[in-house]
Amino acid sequence: MSDRTPSQQAALERSAALEEQVLVAPGMFRVLTGDRPTGPLHIGHYLGTLANRVRLQDLGVEVIVLIADYQVMTDQQASRQLPATVRGVVADYLAAGIDPDRSTIFTHSAVPALNELVLPFLSLVSDAELHRNPTVKAETEATGRPPTGLMLTYPVHQAADILFCHANLVPVGLDQLPHLETTRLIARRFNERYANRSPLFPEPDALLTANPMLAGLDGRKMSKTRGNGIALHATEDQTAAMIRRAPTDSERRITYDPLTRPAVANLLDLLGAAIGKDPRHLADEIGNGGAGRLKQMLAEAVNELLRTLRRRRAELAEDISYLDSVLDTGNARARLLADQTLTKVHDLLGMTYANRTSHSRPSPGSPMLPNRAVGSGRTQGDAATGRDRIGRASAAQR
Ligand code: TRP
C-alpha cells in the first residue's frame, strides 16, 4: 500500500503521534467507534478494529461503541434480522473483551437526541459536498441506484455519532477518512458560526489501526454479504473449510507479491495480522510448502487466535437478558451525554423558550411510561460487582 495520497500520509503521521500521546495520557481521550449491524462480526473487524478498541480500553481510554442500527435501513435483508444481529454484535464485543463496566455500548435508535443533532448539522453542509463523498459515490455505483437521502447524509449522521459525546479520537481505516473529514468540517463550522468564543465541539482525529484494510478470503473487500470473511463465531471446522476454498494461483512456491499475486498476498496479509509477523518473512518461511501449507497455517492461526473469544461468545449468546441489560445500561449513558449536548446546541441556536426537554426520556414515574422499567434492575448502576469470569452478572443479580 504505497500509493497513498498526501492527505492519507498526513493522517498516518498524525495518527502515529496520537498513538504516543495515548500511552502517556489515556485520560485525555474519548474514543467513539462503531459498526453497522449488517451481520455477525468477522475476522476483519477483529484484526482491523475490535482488538484495537479493547487495547485502548485497557490502556485507560474511555471507549464508546455505537451499533449504528439506523444505518442498515438501506439494507432490507439486514433490517429484518436486526434483533438477532444486534444481540450477536453485542456478544461479539463482549467476547472480544469490551468491558461494559468501563466502556459504553449503545444503538442509534435508543438515543433520540443524537439523531436530532443531524438537523442542525445538515444546515452546515452543501448538497455538492454531500455528493462528493467517495464512500457515498462508491455505494451509489455499487447499487446502481441514486443514493437515498439517508445514504447521502450518512456522513452527517456519522458526525452526530462522534460529536454527541465530544469524542476526540476515532479509530478507523483509511477508507473512512473522508467521513471523518466531514465530521471535522461540521465541528469547525458549528463552532465558527454558533460558538465562537468557546468552541462546543472538538475536531476529532483519526486513529489509524495497524491493519486498517484487510481484504476478504477472495481478495475483495471483506463483507458479510460477500461471505468472504470468517465470522468470529464460526466453528474451527467452518473456518478451515472456508480457508481451504479461498482462491490462490497455480504457482507452487509462495511469494509475497501483492501486485502480481494478489490472492496469495492477501492470505499472507491475514496470516501476518493474525500472528503478528511480516507477510514477506512468512512467504519465505512457507516457500515450497505451497498454498496448502499457507492455508493450513492460516486456519490454525485464526482458530488459535479466536479460541477463547469463541468459548466466551458461545456462553454469552445464551444469555439474551444479559446482552439486553448491557445495551440498556449503555443506551442510558449515551442518552445522558446526547441530551446534554443537544441542550447546549439549543442554547447556542437560541432555542431557549418553553418545553425544551421534550427530547429527553420521560422519567419512569411519568404518565407516558406506565409501570415499565421500574425496579427491573436492568438500568444503570447494577453493573459494578459480582461478575463471573466472562464478565456476566451473577445469577443473584439477574
Ligand atoms: N461507518 C461505519 C462502518 O460502516 C460505522 C459507523 C457509524 C461509525 N457511525 C460511526 C464508525 C462513527 C465510526 C464512527 O463501519
Image (cartoon, rainbow, N blue to C red):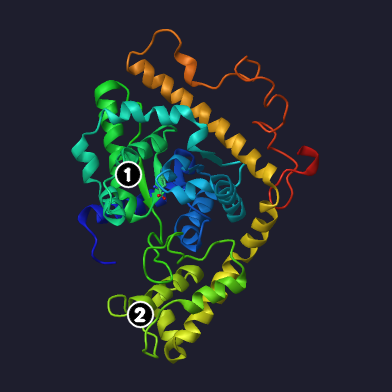
**Residue 180, labelled with which disc?**
1
Q: Residue at x 34, y 50 (%)?
A: 176
Q: Along the line of sight, which residue is nearer the eye, 297 or 41?
A: 41
Query: What kind of residue is marked 2?
Result: Tyr
Whether 39 is drawn above or below 65: the answer is below
Query: What kind of residue is marked 1?
Result: Leu
Quarter of the rendering occupied by the N terminus: bottom left
Q: Can you give x and y, in whole percent of width and height, for residue 115 in the image?
A: 42, 31
Q: Residue at x 37, y 61 (%)?
A: 213
Q: Can you give x and y, in whole percent of width and height, for residue 247 in the image?
A: 41, 78
Is the residue at mark 2 in contact range of ligand 1, meaning its CB lies under 8 Å from it?
no
Q: Name the residue under label 2.
A: 256
In this rendering, position of residue 397 left or right of residue 47: right
Whether 156 is drawn above or below 5: the answer is above
Quarter of the rendering occupied by the C terminus: top right
Is the residue at mark 1 in contact range of ligand 1, meaning its CB lies under 8 Å from it?
yes
Q: Residues within 10 Å of mark 2 (few under 14, many from 20)?
A: many
Element assignment for label 2: loop
In this rendering, position of residue 95 left or right of residue 17: right
| Residue 268 occupies quadrant | bottom left
Q: Can you give x and y, in whole percent of width and height, for residue 392 in the image?
A: 70, 46
| Numbered marks: total | 2
Q: Can you give x and y, in whole percent of width and height, for residue 9 in the image?
A: 26, 56
| Residue 8 occupies quadrant | bottom left
Q: How crowded is mark 1: few (under 14 residues within 10 Å), some or many (20 or more)?
A: many
Q: Which residue is drawn at 51% across and 56% down?
A: 41
Q: Along the line of sight, which residue is nearer the eye, 143 or 359?
A: 143
| Residue 311 occupies quadrant | bottom right
Whether residue 344 appears in this view of the structure is yes
